[in-house]
Image (cartoon, rainbow, N blue to C red):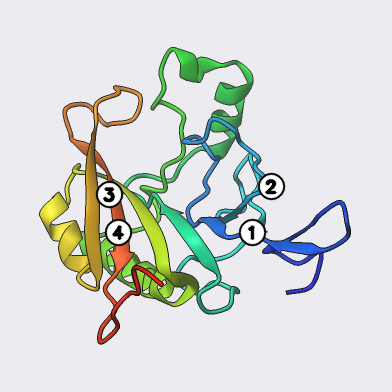
Amino acid sequence: MLAGLPGTKTGKTGGNNQVDILDATAGNRTMWQTKNSENIIYIDIQKQLWVKPTIYASNEQTPFRDKQFHTIFYDPPHDYGDKPFDFNMGKVAVHKQWLRKKPFGHTYYGWDIYKTKRELIAHIWRAQKEFQRILRDDGLLWVKWCEIRLSLKRLLNIFADWRLLMKIHVKSPTQTWGNKQTYWLLFEKKLKGKQKQLFT
């Protein structure tokens, strides 16, 4: 890729270093402690976010080349059928720091994007297919999921072409929804007919 386009950064010597970490559901970057790392590309399709992505793009059909990324983070909407989000109120909440007192009250989760469970499942399936294309064969996919109305078991069925390496139970009340369990899941690709070379 050429300098200045998404996916590259220019070093002190003028050479290009590939950015190989993707946040595929950037939102307002609420999960990140550092909101603007030069080592991460942030994408989202929502134009009203108050923290803008690196580029506006759908994670179902990205502009990136095959096997570009080593690590992808994916935090999809965990629910569906919600009323349209009030972005103006959300911006006011951030400005007045209301989120310190009510962390979920004015945070955008994308629960209004998909009207039915079928639509949400279809989105996740299409996104993970795209991740198969743009993730390296030795890359890692991190997925965050909360069991609001879709169980972890049902979610894992969608990721049938992935190998689950790790399942982390999230305990922090600011990272889960009421008494619903939240997880961070770590996947790698299932490489059909390929044997990874462990030693040389």
Task: Give, as a three-letter code, the residue at label 1.
Answer: Val
**Residue 61 versus residue 52 in the image, above or below:** below
Q: Nearer the viewer, residue 153 or 27?
A: 153
Secondary structure state at the residue bearing disc 1: loop
Total numbered labels placed on residues in the image = 4
Callouts 1 and 3 close, C-beta under 8 Å:
no
- Dot 4: within a 10 Å radius of its alpha carbon, few (fewer than 14), some, or many (20 or more) residues? some
Q: Is residue 87 left or right of residue 15?
A: left
Task: Give, as a three-letter code, the residue at label 4.
Answer: Phe
**Residue 182 versus residue 101 in the image, above or below:** below
Residue under label 3: 185
Q: Nearer the viewer, residue 10 or 127?
A: 10
Residue 9 pos. (x, y %): 76, 58
Callouts 4 and 3 close, C-beta under 8 Å:
yes
Residue under label 2: 38
Secondary structure state at the residue bearing disc 4: strand
Task: Report the disc number at residue 19.
Answer: 1
Q: Marks 3 and 2, Cα distance to the nearest angstrom?
A: 24 Å
Q: Marks 2 and 1, Cα distance to the nearest angstrom?
A: 8 Å
Residue 140 pos. (x, y %): 39, 59
In what quadrant of the picture does the N terminus appear? bottom right
First in sequence: mark 4 vs mark 1: 1
**Residue 163 found in image quarter:** bottom left
Residue 138 makes an appearance in the image: yes
Task: Give, as a three-letter code, the residue at label 3.
Answer: Leu
- Dot 1: within a 10 Å radius of its alpha carbon, few (fewer than 14), some, or many (20 or more) residues? some
Secondary structure state at the residue bearing disc 3: strand
Q: Which residue in the rendered view is the most extreme toward the top?
A: 101
Callouts 2 and 1 close, C-beta under 8 Å:
yes
Q: Marks 4 and 1, Cα distance to the nearest angstrom?
A: 20 Å
Task: Report the disc number at residue 187.
Answer: 4
In what quadrant of the picture does the C terminus appear? bottom left
